[in-house]
Amino acid sequence: ILKTANQRPVLHFSPKQNWINDPNGLVFLDGEYHLFYQYHPYSSVWGPMHWGHAVSKDLTTWEELDIALYPDDNGTIFSGSAVVDWNNTTGFFPDEPGIVAIFTSHLGGSETSPTVQSQSLAYSHDNGRTWIKYEGNPVLTHSSNPDFRDPKVFWSESHSKWIMALATGQTISLYSSPNLIDWTFESEFGDGAGSHEAVWECPDLFELAVQGTDERKWVLLVSVGDNAELEHGSRTQYFVGTFDGSVFTPEHSDIRWLDYGKDNYAGVSFSDIPEEDGRRIYVAWMNNWRYANQIPSSGWRGSMTIPRTLSLRTSEGRTLLHQHPVKELDHQFTESVALPDLLLSAGKEFEFKAEADCADLNLHLERFEAAEFGIIIHHTGTDRTVLSYSAADRTLSLRREQSGDTGFSAMFPLPQTTEELGQLKDIRVLIDASSVEVFANDGLSSITSLIFPEKPLERLSFYTVGGQVQLRGGSVKLIR
Ligand code: FRU
């Protein structure tokens, strides 16, 4: 057990030193998952961006490697993606397929020099260990839009071309290319759809099967930045629709949030997951631009969410995104305890010891007759994080005002509440040294939240208010 609360996560990627933000270039090749990320190697606050690099074979234990991409004459290295060029469409790989990174070159941004953002390429012949910048960089420029960034690229099998989704202000623009070098504008999406509270960033566009049907639909993820007037800072929305190789058409214009916690931003999915695996695996930066530069730090700052498998399900005419922690996570725990079936009633709190670095709690709820049901995560001492479901509102809330250090931001202690999610049927709570990730109703609603308790995890308790709840088939897994 981490006796000192250094708050470094065990199951989540964090850098050895200094600042990280967005995950970049998520790609799988030769048995390795690559996680590149926005990295400032000289400080624990944001600054001139590089791409840091880590690899994993199981999506949960990461090895940090040397910095992959350094700033150059075209600018610092902002967010982007990576793909395997299997068919040597670029001409970079005469001998063996390799990885191409497509990223934003960022220049200027001060009062004297206006921001210029363009898209550039780098490629690697040795599984991302060393990189060659393409000599014709940048490959995609814009003469007037200062927000022209975060290219996410995929190969469209049915249209035989590369597609790029790019954040272009408060829209997402789509481009296509035969070779990753020459790009053609296809369409622009966003007018009249979704949230326009702030700048759009870090798009991702991919196709998913709708569970239990033969249908497939397209999902567009869009991160929405912070602006000081927002109560919640930066967050992520998504659209479900169709894509014809040129135009994305949503089947709805309402706002759908991907997560109801404050700490899930700039998330994108892995490229080149083998077909026999077939998963769409998503990772986000577990932070919020409102306070990212101020969260407690002991030399390193920032971490990623647990990788999640995304799926689509239709209910009551709406096709919605569900998230589940990747199954690889299950093998990381050293202990698994089955909980007794419990009939909770008012005044009968159930509590159990969970002295551990990490915990993964799973509960099924039946015969819900209470007004409120809650889970309390107790850390040694008085720090506690409270999760509660309100039967009247049919919403789940996470309250972290007593979770430990909260004083670095006025927004941090405010409650985080889901939209109406119906009757609460099941809940999964993944606790690491400085985070809580909650997945309710088979992954339909999630709350991703940082916490900074002073001391390690000690116990978990359940309570109800105003009636009974039957818990059945619960379990808790621990890492000690
Ligand atoms: C999102 C973002 C991106 C940009 C990067 C810079 O968090 O603002 O739009 O490329 O971070 O670090």
Image: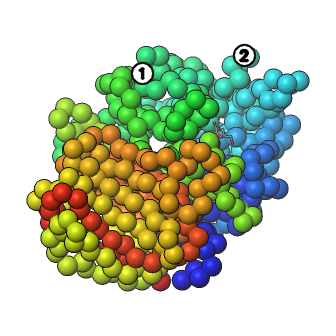
Residue drawn where x is 65% and y is 52% of the image: 408
Q: Residue 25, how many percent across, how many down?
A: 60, 48
Residue 227 position (above or below residue 341): above
Q: Quadrant of residue 173?
A: top right
Q: Amino acid at mark 2?
A: Ser
Q: How is the image coloured?
A: rainbow
Quadrant in the picture for the N terminus: bottom right
Instruction: Look at label 1 and name its amino acid.
Output: Ala
| Helix, strand or loop at mark 2 | loop
Where ligand 1 lies, by image quadrant? top right
The answer to whether residue 229 is above or below residue 429 is above
In the displayed structure, 269 sits above or below 464; it is above
Q: CA distance from mark 1 to mark 2?
A: 24 Å
Residue at the far right: name it.
112
Give the mark, 1 or 2, whose residue is nearer the N terminus.
Answer: 2
- Residue that label 1 marks: 193
Determine if residue 372 is in view.
Answer: yes
The residue that mark 2 highlights is 144
> Residue at the location (78% across, 40% down)?
76
Position of residue 283 measured from the top left corner of the image (x, y, whole percent): 50, 52
Q: Residue at x 71, y 44 (%)?
A: 122
Q: Find residue 71 and report its image quarter.
A: top right
Dot 2: few (<14), some (14–19), or many (≥20) neighbours within 10 Å?
few
Circle 1/circle 2 CB separation < 8 Å: no
Give the image location of residue 117, x and y in percent.
Answer: 73, 29
Picture coordinates of residue 429, whole percent (x, y): 37, 63
Choose between 352 and 323: the one closer to the eye. 352
Q: Is residue 25 left or right of residue 213?
A: right
